[in-house]
Image: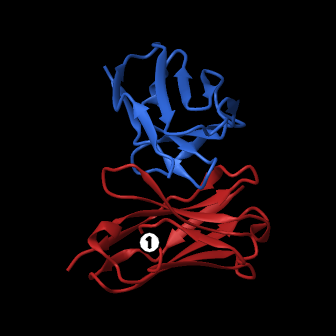
Amino acid sequence: QVQLVESGGGVAQPGRSLRLSCAASGFTFSSYPMQWVRQAPGMGLEWVAVISYDGSNKYYADSVKGRFTISRDNSKNTLYLHMTGLRGEDTAVYYCARKHYEDYFDYWGRGTLVTVSS
Amino acid sequence: DIQMTQSPSTLSASVGDRVTITCRASQSIRSWLAWYQQKPGQAPKLLIYKASTLESGVPSRFSGSGSGTEFTLTINSLQPDDFATYYCQQYDRFWTFGQGTKVEVK
């Protein structure tokens, strides 16, 4: 069955960096675009970034553009989110999600919590 | 950017009730709308896509309708497992979520 397992969350000081990983299994990872979505404490869902199946195309939400980088290693079935210049408003649970070819998100991981605090 | 507005924010209901949640888009998104269910501490779960297509394995008491800018999610005969927060999501142009509707015990 499809499994997505995020890791790499933790506490980071403002301005610092953090890299999240999402290990995928149960499907042909290299055939699917992948996403990151985040959810601030007690808040709703916010799309963060998307990467094409081969990594050639990437798009970002305005709130993270220029600070976050999405990437993937299809040989390792792993999705990444490199976050730099972290701000308090980046505090959230970060989910990776698989994008169905019709563009909705059909599978999600359980998330990893990022807390930005001094 | 396309904005998504859900109503109500909170809905109090009892087991067996029929529940309806509304989602409005700031511009037409045709039928490119999905609904997700999220329980505390869990990842969102896909319920419905393309406004009205039920995801495999989702109980038939869930249904979706609408097109353009107005959409509804209906739960017929609410079950104990259905108390959760529900989000709509447009995927016509990138992705935007509604703010969520919490279905709580009356």
Question: Residue B36 is drawn in which quadrant?
Answer: top right
Q: Residue at x 65, y 76 (%)?
A: A78
- In the rendered structure, the colour chosen for chain A is red
Task: Tell me the kind of residue under disc 1.
Answer: Val
What colour-coding does the image apply? by chain
Q: Position of residue A107 (x, y in %)?
A: 63, 53
Q: Return the chain for callout 1.
A: A
Placement of B47 over or under A114, stated as above or below: above
Question: Residue A97 is drawn in which quadrant?
Answer: bottom right
- In the figure, is residue A88 to the left or right of B78? left
Q: Position of residue B22 (x, y in %)?
A: 47, 27
The residue nearer to you, when weighing B57 against A80, is A80
- In the figure, is residue A58 to the left or right of A53? left
According to the picture, the residue beneath numbered tag 1 turns out to be A64
Q: Position of residue A61 (x, y in %)?
A: 49, 65
Q: Position of residue A109 (x, y in %)?
A: 56, 59
Judged from the image, the secondary structure of the residue bearing numbered disc 1 is loop
The residue nearer to you, when weighing B44 against B31, is B31
Placement of A16 over or under B77, stated as above or below: below
State whether residue B85 appears in this view: no
- In the figure, is residue A45 to the left or right of A51? left
- In the figure, is residue B24 to the left or right of B63? left
Chain that the image shows in blue: B
State whether residue A73 appears in this view: yes
Q: Residue at x 46, y 67 (%)?
A: A62
Task: Give the quarter of the figure containing the C terminus of chain B.
Answer: top left
Residue situated furthest left in the rendering? A118
